[in-house]
Image (spheres, grey):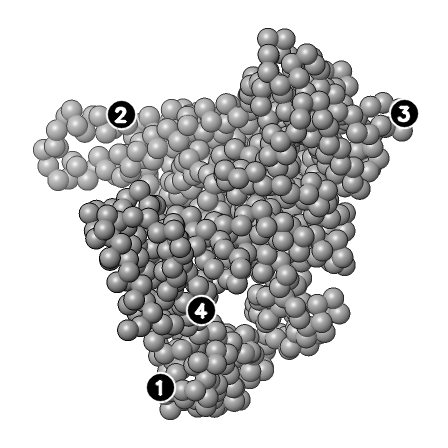
Amino acid sequence: MKLHQIALCLLWIKASRGAECPTDEISFLREFEDPLYEEGQSVSLFCHFFVSADCGPIKWDFTSGREISIIVPSSRFQIHDVTNETGLYSTLTINPITVRDENSIACRVRGMTILYSIHIIPLPKVVISPLFKAVEKGSDAIIVCNITNEHLRLFNDTFKWCHGSDEIQNTSHIDVKGVSTLNLTRVTLRDSGRYGCGARGYDDACANMKHVSRLEVYRTKGTTFCIEEFDNRTGLTWVKTPAGTLVMQPCRSNFTGITERLCEDNGVWGIVIEIDCVRQEIQSALEDILHLESTPGNTESVINTVISSISAVTANSESLTSGDLNSTTTILERVVSIMSNTADNVIVNEQVFVGIINDMLAPDYQVTWSEVNDKSSDAVAGNLMKIIENFGCIVTRNLPTGNLIILNRSNINVEFRKIDATVRMINFYPEQTLTGSDVGISLNLDSESASDITYTAAFYRTISGFLPRSSSNRGVPEYSSEVISLSIGSGMTTNHLSTPVVLNFDTEKLIRKNNLTGELNTKCVFWDFGAKKSPGWSSKGCRRVNDSCHCEHLTNFAVLMSPIQILDELTLINLKMITIVGCSISVAGTVLTMLTYLVLWRHVKNDQTRLLMNLCVALTVSYVLFLTGIDKTENDAVCTTIAVMLHYFFLATFCLMLAEGGVLLMSVTIVFYSKSKLKWLLAFGWGTPALVVGITAGITRAQKYHSQYHCWLNISNGVLYSFVGPVIAIILMNIAVIVRVQRAIYSSHFIVTKTRRQKIMTGVRSISILLPVLGVTWLFGILAVNADFVVFQYIFAIANSLQGFFIFLCYCVFSVPIRRALENKIKMLTSGVLSSKEDYKLKVIKTKPSNVTTDKYALTNGVPTPFKKATSYQQASVLRRFDSFTAFPNKASR
């Protein structure tokens, strides 16, 4: 009989005698030896002991030599125990199993042990090269796929290749002992794209291929290139590449991951992106922590090993990549989380832990942290403050009352302390200004607190430079000071302090550092981790009192400085309300204008009214988009779409205004013109904005099209000027039109005969009529340059938000042709159908506007006006436009 069979017989005999617990340890293997499992599988191991329930429970552990690591149930390890009259049963399920689990796994109860010796077959490790290749059309290209696992290198036909979502035939690649070579001959533009390879049977779907290479096929003629370049910092060579292409290649030696670099549209290489490049030591540490989360055991030993290995890297590395900073932050977050959630008292060297963060906050890493922030939706550097706070809670809970730990480093000062109930004040002043003032924080403690209080205080000298740069409401950049932090671990509530915490900052240093001059706006803020959009500075609960900051809660504090805002906050609120109300009224005005003209269309239709209708459409869409979408910044794609649409419809509005000015100018300078220009004017009004917006979106690739705080054009990269430039040009041209019209009016014999008061009223009426459709009121926005000219801000907001309402007043309410058309419409409805067709035709002739003025008398506002009152037909035409608040002559299309 085999050993394990003898052991089972002995256990059965003992169980039959009363299931006594054994006193001598008996260990044996299961009936099958060295079982094989494939990485990623779900594995179940089973134990059965013929003993009484009093001998339990069964325990599982990993055994490696003399080291034993107890297996604790977790998300990856499930333990199911059963007890009945036949003994103790236990099932261990590991899902998924990893290469790290390759070991001896034992289940034990008292002196008995069942031992499993398992082996794991790892998943295929695939390497594809090159990750990117650019070749000329008609050339040949080779892509190589290599499987590094020894157990798979024995097979030849183990590869699968895909081009996009289509599988490539086996005849296109040659497979020899773990290496597959894909040969592409005389490539065409269709061969460009994504090529993936993998071991057959793994990731079979082409869409699931994880190991891919990108091929870019180009035409030499007319193609701009980035020349081949060697990067001294990374030791990588970037090959000749067509403009507008993103190039990828493996990170430098001793790093894992892929590095990227964009060949810009102008043929200049962009910066090297290393957010995915992580040192192998840091990557191994991350894997150890992730394994510890899913496989609890030896927590203190693993954490201290990880901390030591990371400290060796951060302290001795000349430069950490953005991937190093990002991964190290993740490791520290998970270490603190494990320490907080474990029941064991894990001891970590505070000097080493804080030293890692100090090294990460070195001033030389400002550009690297910017890359981390650009590639992450979260402000990763800000998480270091949360890590220090949580680590402080762990450290201080083990401190004896009255003990203090002070850690002073070059980039950070930290203080951990536990104080008894008799202490009534917390003071933390780690630095002084040049004038001798203390920089720090103080807090009066609640006199009713009867328990010991633990706190963590920190002073960050450099971290504000690594956080995303904020801007004021008007886009003025804000500069932040050093950050001071205070958190209470136990003993009192800190959300609503009965006595505010007082902070003192070195504002003079902040002014000198950023070369700030003139009047400055200083604001007390804290880093808000719970902000809706993303973490950032907030002033809620903080106020400036003399030269100090007073806040009603505890967290991480700073002061923000910026050049004084053009407008105060109350003015900004007032202008916002004026804009919202005005735009809403204008939408109603433009809609009513369109409805009025549609109802009376047969009586008023001509080129000018058609242009007016198009202008109303553009204005209505612009107002609605502005009201509903200007603040939708949560989703970048949606915000970019809104900004593009606002850009187009506002430009279309101005182009249609210019078309209105063109029609008016032609009527002043050309007495008789017979051919309608409407189709050309509409093509200009709607087509030119599309061209401008298309070019702008193409140049920027729709990246950073909108500003940070609104879905409107970004000024930092010049997108705003693609709107401002055309608008200024159109306004200047329309001003010229107004001047030409005024000259024509005042040079006429008709106006000369009027009194001075009548002349003034005629000019005022004509300008009032022209302003709503020519957009000249936008000049008030240019005049509102600072707080001394705030009146122009109000005029600008009122005039432009109510533009649609003014159009309704001038072209509907006060329009003589509209009133007469409405009267005729009512008469027709009340009088019924005329008795004969001839009478009906006669009425149409009398009421319908005429497009050609060839008779001695012309119809203006429905009233015959003899030309003899003016010195010329031209002057008469001009005068008729402004009689009785009528902007357009009642003419049909020519």
Q: CA distance from mark 1 to mark 2?
A: 80 Å
Nearer the observer: mark 3 or 2; the answer is 3
Choose top left, top right, bottom left or bottom right for residue 805: top left
**Mark 3–mark 2 contact, CB under 8 Å?**
no
* Residue at disc 2, secondary structure: helix
User: How far from the left and from the top, in percent, is residue 452?
Assistant: 62, 19
**How would you rate the neighbour count of disc 1 (Cα within 10 Å): few for under 14, some for 14-19, many for 20 or more?**
few
Q: CA distance from mark 3 to mark 4?
A: 60 Å
Whether residue 461 is situated above or below residue 490 in the rendered picture: below
What is the residue that sits farthest to the right in this orientation? 435
Can residue 269 be seen here?
A: yes
Nearer the observer: mark 4 or 2; the answer is 4
Of residue 324 and residue 706, the one placed in the foreground of this image is: 324
Amino acid under disc 2? Glu
User: How far from the left and from the top, in percent, is residue 494?
Assistant: 58, 20
Nearer the observer: mark 1 or 2; the answer is 1
Q: Which residue is mark 2?
A: 823
* Residue at disc 4, secondary structure: loop
**How would you rate the neighbour count of disc 2 (Cα within 10 Å): few for under 14, some for 14-19, many for 20 or more?**
few
Q: Which residue is mark 1?
A: 169
Q: Residue at x 52, y 63 (%)?
A: 65
Q: Earlier in the sequence, mark 3 or mark 4?
A: 4
What is the residue that sits farthest to the left in this orientation? 835
Disc marking residue 210: 4
Amino acid under disc 3? Thr
Q: Which residue is mark 3?
A: 435
Amino acid under disc 4? Lys
For this view, does 704 lie left or right of residue 678?
Answer: right
Q: CA distance from mark 3 to mark 1?
A: 77 Å
Whether residue 364 is situated above or below residue 405 in the rendered picture: below
Can residue 571 be seen here?
A: no
